[in-house]
Image (tube, rainbow, N blue to C red):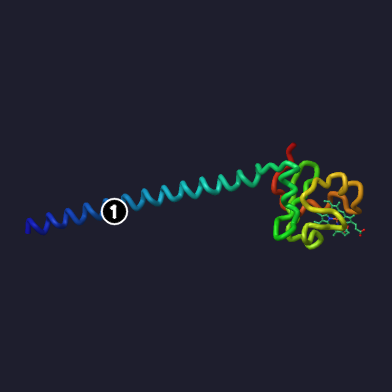
Amino acid sequence: MKKFWLIFIIVFALALTACGSAKTEEKVEETATEQTSEGTQESTIEKEFTKEQLKEFNGKEGKAAYIAVDGVVYDVTGVPQWKDGGHNGFEAGNDLTKEINEVSPHGVSKLKDLTVVGKLVD
Ligand code: HEM
């Protein structure tokens, strides 16, 4: 009978330890997820492009198409009017502030539904 109680106590103690460590693992995972999502947010909001870097996003050969207006960089990838990075003779990968205000019939009104990807820096 003594043996039975001894085994019972050992099994009980082992079960308690297992539960405890499982909970700790859960907590670590939660923290890791929080950190990742914070990191992702930061990188999308704070992305900076020089004119040279912006040039890479010309919408050609499967690349993304970005345009800059008033220091803000917008994503026009997938916008039908900007197929392959071109629109009425204008090319993605450029600062088109002057052109959208002075040449286009629509002005900046078309920008409001676009995704902002960052800002243009010197
Ligand atoms: C960023 C600089 C931009 C420039 C310089 C520009 C220039 C122009 C020009 C010159 C036209 C007139 C074409 C014609 O003679 O018929 C035009 C029309 C048009 N553009 Fe743009 N565009 C720009 C951005 C955009 C963007 C970001 C969009 C959409 C997201 C867009 C959508 C359109 C549409 C739908 C038309 C047809 C007319 C209208 O709805 O007003 N454009 N654009």
| Percent position of residue 63, x then y | 70, 57
User: Which residue is at 65% across, 42% downward?
Assistant: 46
| 84 relative to 39 in the view: left or right | right
Viewer-nearest residue: 80 or 10: 80
| Percent position of residue 76, x then y | 75, 55
Report if the beta carbon of the residue with label 1 is closer than 8 angstroms to ligand 1.
Answer: no
Q: How many marks?
A: 1
| 71 relative to 102 in the view: left or right | left
| Percent position of residue 16, x then y | 26, 52
Viewer-nearest residue: 85 or 11: 85
Q: Mark 1 points at which residue?
A: 18
Viewer-nearest residue: 108 or 97: 97
| 82 relative to 17 in the view: left or right | right
Label 1 element class: helix
Dot 1 amino acid type: Ala
Q: Few, some or many C-alpha atoms within 10 Å of disc 1 (few <14, some 14-19, many ≥20)? A: few
| Percent position of residue 105, x then y | 91, 53
Work out whether 84 lies above or below 16. Answer: below
User: Which residue is at 71% across, 43% downward?
Assistant: 49
